[in-house]
């Protein structure tokens, strides 16, 4: 829906822009989850 023209109820974003935003979002989530998982598994002395 975000790639649809604004006149058709979308956000007016191109398919390429939508894909880039989706890719960046996934990468940020993966990096965040990897960082927090390592911190949670670190042995506490």
Image: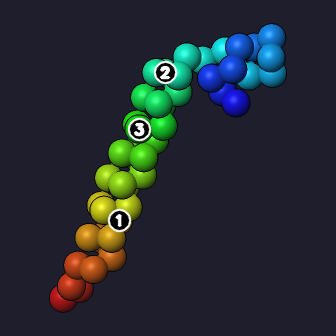
Quarter of the image that includes the N terminus: top right
Q: Is residue 25 placed above or below 4 in the rendered structure?
A: below
Helix, strand or loop under label 2 = helix
Dot 3 corresponds to which residue?
A: 23
Q: Quarter of the image holding residue 32?
A: bottom left
Residue 36: percent from left, percent from top: 35, 65
Going 67% across and 15% down the picture, which residue do you hit?
Answer: 12
Going 47% across and 30% down the picture, which residue do you hit?
Answer: 19
Q: Is residue 10 placed above or below 32 in the rendered structure?
A: above
Left or right: residue 36 versus residue 12 is left
Give the total of numbered labels.
3
Q: Which mark is residue 17?
A: 2
Marks 3 and 2, how far apart at CA = 10 Å
Mark sitting earlier along the chain (2/1): 2
Marks 1 and 3, how far apart at CA = 20 Å
Mark sitting earlier along the chain (1/3): 3
Whether pointer 2 and pointer 1 mark residues with C-beta atoms closer than 8 Å, the reply is no
Quarter of the image that includes the C terminus: bottom left
Helix, strand or loop under label 1 = helix
CA neighbours of label 2 inside 10 A, class few (<14), some (14 to 19), many (20+):
few
Q: Is residue 5 placed above or below 43 in the rendered structure?
A: above
CA neighbours of label 1 inside 10 A, class few (<14), some (14 to 19), many (20+):
few
Mark sitting earlier along the chain (3/2): 2
Residue 40: percent from left, percent from top: 33, 76
Task: Compare residues 42 and 24 and report the one nearer the observer.
Answer: 24
Between marks 1 and 3 in the image, the one whose residue lies nearer the viewer = 3
Residue 9: percent from left, percent from top: 81, 21
């Amino acid at each position: 829906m975000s790639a649809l023209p604004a006149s058709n109820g979308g956000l007016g974003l191109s398919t390429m822009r939508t894909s880039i935003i989706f890719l960046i979002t996934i990468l940020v989530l993966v990096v965040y989850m990897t960082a927090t998982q390592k911190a949670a598994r670190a042995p506490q002395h």
